[in-house]
Amino acid sequence: MNLGRLNHVGLAVPDLDAARAFWRETMGATELCEPFDMPEQGVRVCFVDTPNGGTQVELLAPLSGDSPIGGFLSKNPAGGQHHLCFEVPDIAAARSEFDGMGKRILGPTRIGAHGTPIFFVHPKDMGGILTEIMETPR
């Protein structure tokens, strides 16, 4: 597996409006997308662009208490780093490679917040970090 570009760092947040204000007021972010819901994943999402135009910060708030992000926040009430997301040119090939290495893939390949196929790899197989693998947007 070749390491692709770091697309984003996912942060779980208990309050999306407060998190957006923090990134605007404290961190000086000027490019924040409008928040949008992803009901199939149980999250409300907002991307923050970094000045270099490359890596983004993904703010994730739960849509309900049974959201995976809600579970993360029950253990980490202030929020925090949820995952790292790396790009690959071919999601099916990447999934096959991770599977061949014996890495535990969490759930099916599905469409992520950028509109491209994604899957997650278990943190216990990735040095303690939940890792999202994402097909590079075209």
Image: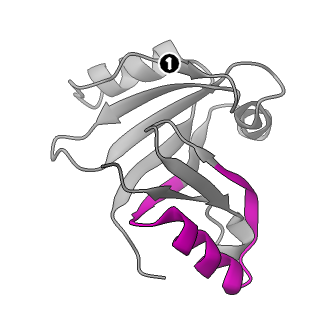
Q: Amino acid at mark 1?
A: Phe
Magenta residues, as a range? 84-109
Q: Quadrant of residue 58?
A: top left
Quadrant of the image occupied by residue 102:
bottom right
Q: Nearer the viewer, residue 97 or 75?
A: 97
Please, is residue 120 above or below residue 20 in the view? below
> Taking 114 as reference, is 125 left or right?
right
Give left or right: position of 104 versus 97: right
Q: Residue at x 46, y 38 (%)?
A: 115
Between 23 and 26, the residue placed more toward the observer is 23
Q: Dot 1: within a 10 Å radius of its alpha carbon, few (fewer than 14), some, or many (20 or more) residues?
A: few
Residue found 70% across the figure and 75% down from its top: 125
Which residue appears at 30% of the width and 49% of the height? Answer: 138
Judge by depth and name the residue closer to the eye, 57 or 23.
57
Q: Position of residue 120 (x, y in %)?
A: 64, 57
Q: Above or below — where is 72 with respect to 16?
A: below
Image quadrant in which you'd find residue 79: top right
> As displayed, is residue 57 above or below residue 31?
below
Mark 1 lies on a secondary structure that is strand
**Residue placed furthest toward the left:** 52
State the residue position of label 1: 36
Judge whether residue 102 is colored magenta. Answer: yes
Q: Please state the horizontal and vertical placement of residue 126, each as a whole percent of the image.
A: 63, 73
Q: Residue furthest bottom?
A: 101
Tell me which colouring the rendered structure shows. one colour
43 sits left or right of 72 in the view: left
User: In the rendered view, does 124 fall on the left or right side of 111?
Assistant: right
Q: Position of residue 101 (x, y in %)?
A: 67, 86
Q: Residue at x 28, y 32 (%)?
A: 27
Asked if residue 126 is among those painted magenta in the image, a careful observer would answer no
